[in-house]
Image (tube, rainbow, N blue to C red):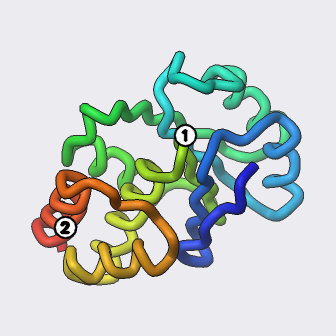
């Protein structure tokens, strides 16, 4: 597993899908919850969402699957993520395939909660090492945060 990015003490973002041994390591490191934003059957899948959920629950952590396809990243899905993430015991490990979706969703959630502007969230995401490599993604993050804060 690639080195995850700590956004806050509560949220850490994975830059790839954890393997079964990584799930055990997450539990050993004190994580209480795992959020998977990958869609079922996504390219490079090492475990189905159901298999991952089973592995996570075996360790005593809480598992949430919110499938997010690149073309379905609407505000309602981010709202759903924020509502579900707020109920999870922390610390929370959030992942997708590369960290782009999980990073964007987590940064939007934290940014709104902290009353930051969309531009502040974009700058902080880039400083943490997240890729925000398309103007559409930057606009989506910026607009979401500015509308929700």
Residue ID for mark 2 = 142
Residue ID for mark 1 = 97
Seen in the picture, residue 54 relative to 1 is either above or below; the reply is above
Residue 47: mark in rendering? none
Q: Position of residue 100 (x, y in %)?
A: 44, 52
- Residue at the image point whose x is 86% and y is 52% from the top: 25
Q: Position of residue 68 (x, y in %)?
A: 38, 34
The one of 102 and 135 positioned closer to us in this rendering: 135
Tell which circle, 1 or 2, labels the residue nearer the N-terminal end.
1
* Tally of numbered tags: 2
Dots 1, 2 in contact, CB < 8 A: no
Q: Position of residue 77 (x, y in %)?
A: 28, 41
Seen in the picture, residue 39 relative to 5 is either above or below; the reply is above
Q: Position of residue 6 (x, y in %)?
A: 60, 72
Q: Residues within 10 Å of mark 1 (few under 14, many from 20)?
A: many
The CA distance from mark 1 to mark 2 is 22 Å
Answer with left or right where residue 32 lies relative to residue 44.
right
Q: Quadrant of residue 142?
A: bottom left
- Residue at the image point whose x is 26% and y is 41% from the top: 73
Answer with left or right where residue 147 lies relative to residue 105.
left
């Amino acid at each position: 597993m690639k080195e995850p990015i700590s956004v806050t003490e509560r949220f850490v973002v994975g830059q790839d899908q954890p393997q079964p041994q990584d799930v055990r390591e997450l539990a050993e490191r004190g994580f209480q919850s795992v959020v998977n934003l990958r869609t079922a059957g996504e390219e490079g899948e090492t475990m189905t969402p159901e298999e991952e959920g089973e592995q996570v629950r075996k360790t005593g952590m809480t598992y949430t699957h919110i499938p997010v396809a690149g073309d379905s990243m609407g505000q309602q899905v981010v709202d759903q993520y924020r509502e579900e993430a707020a109920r999870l015991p922390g610390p929370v490990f959030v992942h997708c395939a590369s960290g782009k979706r999980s990073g964007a969703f987590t940064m939007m959630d934290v940014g709104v909660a902290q009353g930051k502007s969309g531009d502040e969230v974009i700058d902080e995401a880039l400083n943490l090492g997240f890729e925000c490599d398309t103007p559409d993604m930057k606009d989506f993050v910026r607009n979401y945060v500015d509308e929700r804060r």
